[in-house]
Image (cartoon, rainbow, N blue to C red):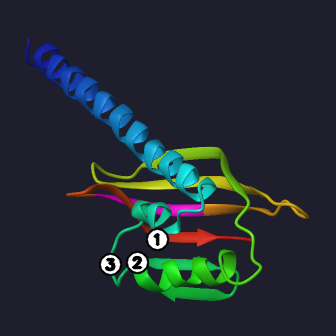
Amino acid sequence: MRLWLSLCVFAAVATVSSGQEADARKDIQKVLDDQAAAWNKGDLPAFMQGYWQSPKLSFFSGNTKTAGWQQTLERYQKRYQHEDKEMGKLAFREISIELLSADHALVKGRYLLTMKNESPTGIFTLIVKKLPVGWRIIHDHTSN
């Protein structure tokens, strides 16, 4: 009887966890979708809403480490909105979202930028955290 009761409780908890996992994956995917939409409108401040607005945000790309939300925004502006720079159209592909806990996840994928004269692509790994404002990227490691 105890074993049966334990199994029933475990099944109920697993079902709730499964539903919470599905909601978290959907919410994290929405962060990425919103970022792509903002990028494609040329709106970097809106794109940056997917990131943790903190000096502790970390962004690694190539051989460069950037610390802080403001510094990450400035890096994007310099690279994609400075003088004759082109932002292009952004798409995310091959997305994998792995929940590490109730409030942390690992996101892996590929970005594609379609520009006039080139189409750069690369892979990325994100650590996202559920904060009071919702899921936000707290670490971004992107290869280019």
Gap between marks 2 and 3 measured at Cα: 6 Å
The range drawn in magenta is 125-130
In the rendered image, residue 89, in percent from the top left (x then y), is placed at: 71, 54
Q: What residue type is labelled 3?
A: Ser
Label 3 sits on residue: 54
* Furthest-right residue in this view: 117
Mark 2 element type? loop
Q: Residue 139: which disc?
A: 1
Label 2 sits on residue: 57
Mark 3 crowdedness (10 Å alpha carbons): few <14, some 14-19, many ≥20: few
**In contact (CB < 8 Å): disc 2 and disc 3:** yes
Mark 1 element type? strand
| Depicted 71 relative to depicted 129: above or below | below
Q: Which amino acid does label 2 sit on?
A: Leu
Residue under the point 65% across and 76% down: 81
The quarter of the picture where the N terminus appears is top left
- Residue 84 falls in image quadrant: bottom right
Gap between marks 3 and 1 measured at Cα: 11 Å
